[in-house]
Image: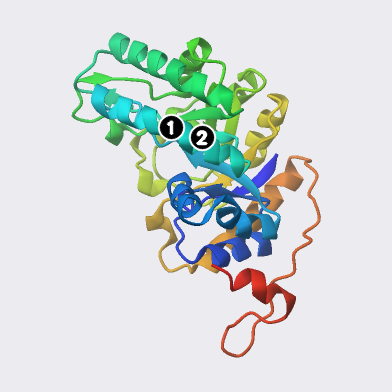
Amino acid sequence: MFRNLSTIGLPLSGRPSELIELALSFGFDAMDIDIIDFQQQADAFGVPHARRLMVSARLKSGTFHLPVQLAADEATFKEELAALPRRLELAQATEANRAVATIAPASDEHSFKDFFELHRSRLNDIGDLLAKHDIMLGLNIRPEMEAREGKANQFIHTFEGLLGLVAVAHERVGAIADAWALHVTGEPLEIIASVPKGRLVEVRLSDAPRDVPAAEMTQDHRLLPGETGAINIAAVLTHATTAGFDGPVTPWADRSTLVGKGREKIVKLAGDRLETAWKEAGLPIAPRWFTPVQRDQFGRPIGEEAAFVGAE
């Protein structure tokens, strides 16, 4: 397993070099890739140029958001599917071998049975393309009641239900174990260990307030991992290890819970808490080889690192 930083999971903004420096400074081994932005950079300047910062920093590629809407109308799905091969080719070029997507938890247009078959069929088409580039797709759920309110038909919104879809999906399709989702649905953390080997694509870690019933939680209750201890994140890592997981572990929190915290503090807190969970789970921690960049009185990088950090 390796510690992964997502600028969606922890809503962060800034120049790529600044975000990479934060990841390196606070113990992260990988970062997620924005595959659409990467395509724009690669098409304009070439793949080596688009990859240069990650390569220079020796950071792994974590995951990338699959640029296909699984629940879209047929015309939109076909259009996005047609654009997918080029994007998967670029993902492979940047060594990003894990895509992620979220399952819609309800539908006004489709019954459960029809929606299930629609997803199975579309995932089969996507899986054939993923296989050509040695990429896995991890599916995530939206467990909160608010995500299903007002919809005519409910769909998959539990981890057990997700595993049912994964069981009949293409072999290149797996699951994301989201500690927050398991807490909201009330499913035991032990269910993570039941994921077939190779089908667990990502682990996401969060915490939750202790004074709000799980069934009443909304996204804005999603806290940084280790905030209250309501979710045992070390246990999540232990069960993921049992499942043979060796991929990205990503901290996740809602923007509203981070108000007043600068991005450096957010990344440091997340990195420190992941390190604590790593130790509690008995996982080895690679030494932090990176030394934070030295800067002059104006905040400009100096020394050998300046060429990397200053490059865009």
Q: From the viewer's side, name the closer residue of 95 and 20.
A: 95
Q: Looking at the image, which residue is at 70% across and 34% down? A: 246
Neighbor class of circle 2 (other Cα within 10 Å; few <14, some 14-19, many 20+) is many
Above or below, 29 against 289 in this view is: above
Residue located at (62% from left, 65% from top)? 21
State yes or no: discs 2 and 1 in contact (Cβ < 8 Å). Answer: yes
Amino acid at the residue labelled 1 = Leu
Question: On the image, which quarter does residue 81 sit in?
Answer: top left
Q: What residue is shown with label 1? A: 84
* Residue 88: numbered disc: 2
Q: Does residue 82 appear anywhere in the picture? A: yes
Mark 1 residue element: helix
Could you tell whether 62 is left or right of 245 in the image? left
Residue 271: x, y in percent? 64, 56
Identify the element where label 2 is drawn: helix
* Residue drawn at point x = 70 percent, y = 73 percent: 305
Amino acid type at mark 2? Leu
* Picture disc at residue 137: none
Q: CA distance from mark 2 to mark 1?
A: 6 Å
Location of residue 26 by image quarter:
bottom right
**Disc 1 packing (10 Å; few <14; some 14–19; many ≥20):** some
Towards the viewer: 158 or 306: 306
Q: Is residue 61 left or right of residue 257?
A: right
